Amino acid sequence: MNKIKSILVASLGMTLGLASCDTGNIRRDPGHVYAPDMTYSRAYDAYTSNPNFEDSMTSRLPVTGTVARGHQLPDHLKEGDTTAYKTLTTAMRFSADELKEGGRLFNIYCGICHGTNLDGQGPLFASGKFASMPANFKDAKYLHMPVGQMYAAVKYGKNMMGSYASQLDIKQRWMVIAHIKKLQSENGGDAFIFGEGVAPAAKADSAKAAAPMMAKADENKKK
Ligand code: HEC
């Protein structure tokens, strides 16, 4: 009897053992999960729909009227309002490093068309593959162009030039424009105003990060 029992146990063991062998098929079913809460997240993934919100978006938009840390206040420019373009300016002033960064960004995003030396003969245009002549910033037509108009061109694009609003944030747009204005000032353009230590022309635009704004609020309190 004992013999039969051990044979049965042994064959049962072998069957189970063989059954667990790889059958050659790829198993997609993970089988039993030890801690399902850890395997299957209960949190909503960023881009999935979500019944907890009216608009079904799991990724929430920033609260209206808030500004992310380290970012600038919105510029309140309206597309097509060319009068506002011309008067828009900024109180931002840039260090030598920031001007250098403006130049780097210009060479990445604008130089391909406008030329790294601003002459409008960037490689894309010079190759003949881009039919529309990019602005030649050394030309009298552009030497004295209001900075706000330049800003609008970067934000909204202009005719054949696309918008660079998604590539460059507000500060970066101004750094790029500062770079253009600096080179223009060396080529017969207006005196350069974006350098540190130059008094801001318009104080209406306090397009600065939160910290300087607080300082400004303190300043106003003292008045
Ligand atoms: C794909 C080519 C191309 C690129 C890249 C490009 N531009 Fe332009 N840009 C043009 C063309 C073409 C015009 C002329 C538009 C017109 O007046 O019809 C122009 C015009 C302008 C003007 C004059 C706007 C006006 O009101 O007349 C400014 C300022 C300017 N670009 C700045 C920039 C800056 C800054 C960048 C980089 C962030 C840039 N552009 C990138 C093609 C380009």
Image: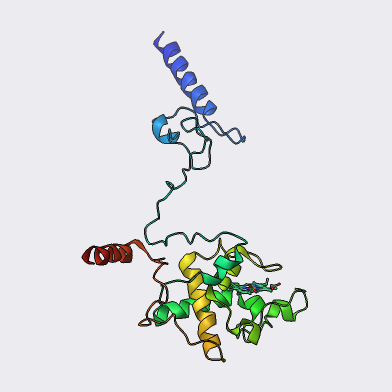
Residue 158 at x, y percent in the picture: 66, 68
Which residue is pictured at 42% across the width and 46% down the height? 63
Q: Quadrant of the C terminus?
A: bottom left
Closer to us: 191 or 18: 191
Q: Position of residue 108 (x, y in %)?
A: 57, 74
What is the x, y in percent for residue 182?
50, 85
- Where 15 falls versus 160 (above or below)? above
Q: Quadrant of residue 110?
A: bottom right
- In the picture as drawn, the residue positioned furthest to the left comes out as 222
**Where the N terminus falls, by quadrant?**
top left
Q: Is residue 167 visible?
A: yes
Asked whether residue 139 appears in the rendered view, the answer is no
Displayed quadrant of residue 207: bottom left
Residue 58 rendering spot, x and y as whole percentages: 48, 39
Of residues 154 and 50, which is closer to you in this image? 154
Q: Residue at x 49, y 78 (%)?
A: 178
